[in-house]
Image: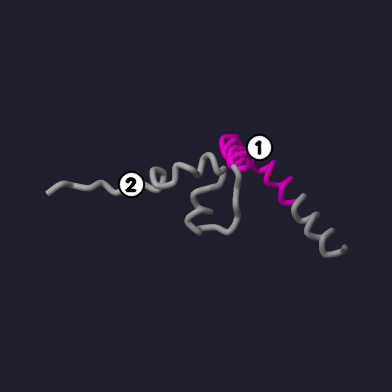
Amino acid sequence: MRQVQEPTYLEEFPWTKWEEVSLDWLVGNTDTELNTNTLNRIQDIDKLNEKDKELIFEFLDSFISNRKIKKVLT
């Protein structure tokens, strides 16, 4: 009997790279579509030391909160 190897998700969805969407989005694990540029930035942030990451996330949290407040007030 011949053994059949099931393809991995990456082999099944090679077009995720040229479509610039995440595999999670394609298989329905998230409703947020992240393009390659955004994913690359997140990976770059993840490579930073903890102090720098904390600073970046502090800024992002403040910025996002500010935008949400502005949206409610307009």
The quadrant of the image that shows the C terminus is: bottom right
User: Nearest the camera: 25 or 1?
Assistant: 1
Q: CA distance from mark 1 to mark 2?
A: 39 Å
List the residue tagged with mark 2: 7
**Would you say residue 47 sits in the magenta stretch?**
yes
Q: Is residue 3 left or right of residue 65?
A: left
User: Nearest the camera: 53 or 23?
Assistant: 23
Which residue ends up furthest to the right in the rendered image? 74
Residue drawn at 49 percent across, 49 percent down:
23
**Would you say residue 7 sits in the magenta stretch?**
no
Q: Which badge, 1 or 2, comes first in the chain's sequence?
A: 2
Packing grade of label 1 (10 A; few <14, some 14-19, many >=20) is few
Which numbered disc covers residue 35?
A: none
Q: Secondary structure at mark 2?
A: loop
Determine which quarter of the picture holds residue 65: bottom right
Residue drawn at 74 percent across, 45 percent down:
59
| Residue 4: % across, % down | 22, 48
Q: Main secondary structure of the magenta part?
A: helix
| Residue 13: % across, % down | 44, 46
Does 5 appear above or below 71? above
Amino acid tagged 2: Pro
Q: Secondary structure at mark 1?
A: helix
- Image: magenta residue range: 36-62
Amino acid tagged 1: Asp
Contact? badges 1 and 2 (CB < 8 Å): no
Does 51 appear above or below 1? above
Residue drawn at 56 percent across, 35 percent down:
47
Residue drawn at 69 percent across, 42 percent down:
56
User: Nearest the camera: 60 or 8?
Assistant: 8
List the residue tagged with mark 1: 52
Packing grade of label 2 (10 A; few <14, some 14-19, many >=20) is few
